[in-house]
Image: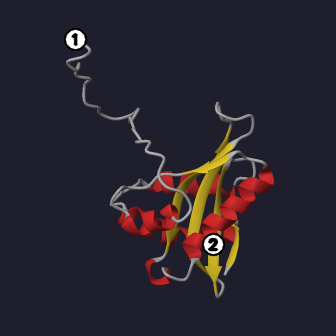
Amino acid sequence: MIIRDATPGDAAAWQTLWAQYLAFYDVDLAAHVTAATWARLINPVSPVKARLALSDERVIGFAIHLHHPSTWAATEDCYLEDLFVAPDARGLGAGRALLDDLIALAAAKGWSRLYWHTNEDNTRARALYDSYVKSDGHIRYRLPLSGPREPHRASVNET
């Protein structure tokens, strides 16, 4: 198995995997969002990057990550935003290889931490992740900043 950075020539293979990833999470993104994501991934100055797993020269998985300053450390952190392995390639060790590669990359860059999240019902991914580290108990909140939002309702403690 080979792990390497995405290149412009990987667009079609990545888009195939990306579509499968979005289907897994039952997400429908506009085509311009996927195009913007790919443009970021191959832009040399973008902090958003993709590492690809290849088996027999076929792209079978990706790890999309970004690095950023931290308020909890003097160096940067690495956030693993998306990790995916093609369904027909699961069990070959690509997910572990991508994580190991990202750990080595982050260590080589001097970043302080690697962190990620996943859906609590994603038992297959959680089994892999738990083999590295147990969940730290944090819960993610996501507030959309565009489009319709539910109005804030005061809780009993706020009134």
Q: Which mark is residue 159?
A: 1
| Three-letter residue code for mark 2 | Ala
Mark 2: which secondary structure?
A: helix
Q: Earlier in the sequence, mark 1 or mark 2?
A: 2
Q: Residues within 10 Å of mark 2 (few under 14, many from 20)?
A: some
- Residue at 66%, 84% in the rendered image: 57
Residue on which the image places disc 2: 97
Q: Is residue 66 above or below residue 88?
A: above
Question: Where's residue 76, x and y in %?
Answer: 71, 41
How far apart are labels 1 and 2 at the CA level? Answer: 51 Å
Residue 33 visible here = yes
Question: Where's residue 119, x and y in %?
Answer: 38, 55
Question: In the image as oriented, which residue stretches furthest toward the left?
Answer: 156
Q: Cβ–Cβ below 8 Å for labels 1 and 2?
A: no
Residue 12 visible here = no
| Three-letter residue code for mark 1 | Thr
- Residue at 61%, 54% in the rendered image: 65
- Residue at 53%, 63% in the rendered image: 83
Q: Is residue 130 above or below residue 79?
A: below
Q: Quadrant of residue 25?
A: bottom left
Question: Where's residue 102, x and y in %?
Answer: 67, 61
Question: Where's residue 58, x and y in %?
Answer: 61, 82
Q: Quadrant of residue 63?
A: bottom right
- Residue at 58%, 71% in the rendered image: 96
Q: Quadrant of the N terminus?
A: bottom right
53 or 114, which is in the foreground?
A: 114
